[in-house]
Amino acid sequence: MTRYPRDMRGYGPNAPDAQWPGGAKIAVQFVLNYEEGGENCLLHGDQASEAFLSDIPGAAQWQGQRHWNMESIYEYGARAGFWRLHRLFTTRDIPVTIYGVAQALARNPEQVAAMKSAGWEIASHGLKWVEHKDMPEDEERAAIAEAIRLHTEVVGEAPRGWYTGRCSANTVRLVAETGQFAYVSDTYDDDLPYWLELGDQNQLILPYTLEVNDMRFATAPGWVTGEDFFQYLKDSFDTLYAEGEAGAPRMMSIGLHCRLIGRPGKIAGLIRFLDYIAGFDGVWTPTRLDIADHWAAVHPHQRIERPSEMNRERFVEVYGGIFEHSPWIAERAHGLELGKAHDCAAGVHNALCRMFRTASHAERHGVLTAHPDLAGKLAAAGRLTAESTSEQASASLDMLTDEEREAFTVLNDTYVAKHGFPFIIAVRDHDKASILANFKRRIDNATEVEFAEACKQVERIAEFRLMDLLP
């Protein structure tokens, strides 16, 4: 059994109503990454200098050496950039979420005091601002535990939010494993929070952003001027706000760094954006923890039985009757590379149809002959499957006049005699009159044409049946 672990479906076409407080049309959330003092540096016990997210073009790590210029750029973020941003947000009474690297927080007590005094959320940004992709799982687990310990010691309370950033494939699972975080943000895959099931742990995920992010002042393609940043922020806001006005409120995360947006020419774009959104009603500017608490209260997680997680026996038990009296289709479908994208009606339907379409002509013919005649003898005798009974009743085929019943009998007999299988139509797409019209129109088709059409109708019937069971 092959299972695909990535989730390409998410909420699908029907995302939940965020129900932001006060009927807000959009939640605009500002993150200030505080990494200064936690970056790669020989003084911090690292083997090389930092090379990531600075104003040094093409920076590379210097093995075994301090990089004085790089250190100085990071120091600007702590010494000047932070305070410029602190003044900006506190003056406007907009709360911020700090992604705080634990060692950086420990080396900057005055800034931590200012964060706390402003009432900002201080989430964890890991123990050190270093790469984790090659870190052994046990080592990363220990680093997470030490980050929580040090953060709690320095800030005075444990973090309730987490974002590593330079993470590994294990990070989200390892953080969720602790069971103490209201949210984890090491994903970039949605415009709304969502729940992730990791073993017995239901972990709320608040997706973050690498594109509505001032890091693009230091990466290519990226921003050159503050106006570039403002325009992208404005366009993102306008699109999401319009979706909120249309009844689909969204979340807009904005990523900031003290050493980048804290520079005078860059922060001008951010100031323009704050001025811009101040002119709109229905804009909520929470911390990420505010969003997490709201989502957990309004959209608490409920586990469902997922098709992709069913064993073969259960999968066939539930979906073996979707194609009339043909459980072999579900048996084969279970062996496909199913994943979270198949935990919905469209997903299971696609898997079942793949097996039906690739079956032999004789096998598909057997599926067609397994279907009952419309309003035929089995219906009169009450021997239809529950699904067929309900479907025929939906088109009032269970309430025919004697004349109508006789007409169906003649058509059924003639059709089967000519084509070798019953007339099949997805009755939920029709009423009694249109069913009869299609019957009379199709009966004279060539058998190969009718075989193809009957197979399409079988798939459509299966689609309806699955929509009764799954979202």
Image: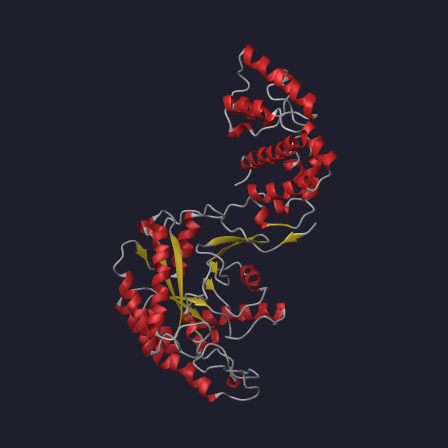
Give the total number of marks visible in the rendering: 0
Answer whether residue 151 is visible to the viewer in this image. Answer: yes
Answer whether residue 120 is visible to the viewer in this image. Answer: no
Residue 433 location, x and y as percent? 50, 21
Residue at 66% over, 18% down: 413
In the image, residue 189 sits, relative to residue 43, either above or below, namely above
Viewer-nearest residue: 253 or 85: 253
Residue at 47% over, 69% down: 125
In the image, residue 460 sits, relative to residue 10, either above or below, namely above
Task: Give the left or right position of residue 139, taking residue 286 as reference.
Answer: right
In the image, residue 419 sits, relative to residue 133, either above or below, namely above
Residue at 48% over, 66% down: 163
In the image, residue 307 sits, relative to residue 93, either above or below, namely above
Tell me which corner region of the image, top left, top right, bottom left or bottom right, holds residue 240: bottom left
Tell me which corner region of the image, top left, top right, bottom left or bottom right, holds residue 222: bottom left
Task: Give the left or right position of residue 367, taking residue 242 as reference.
Answer: right
Outermost top residue: 402
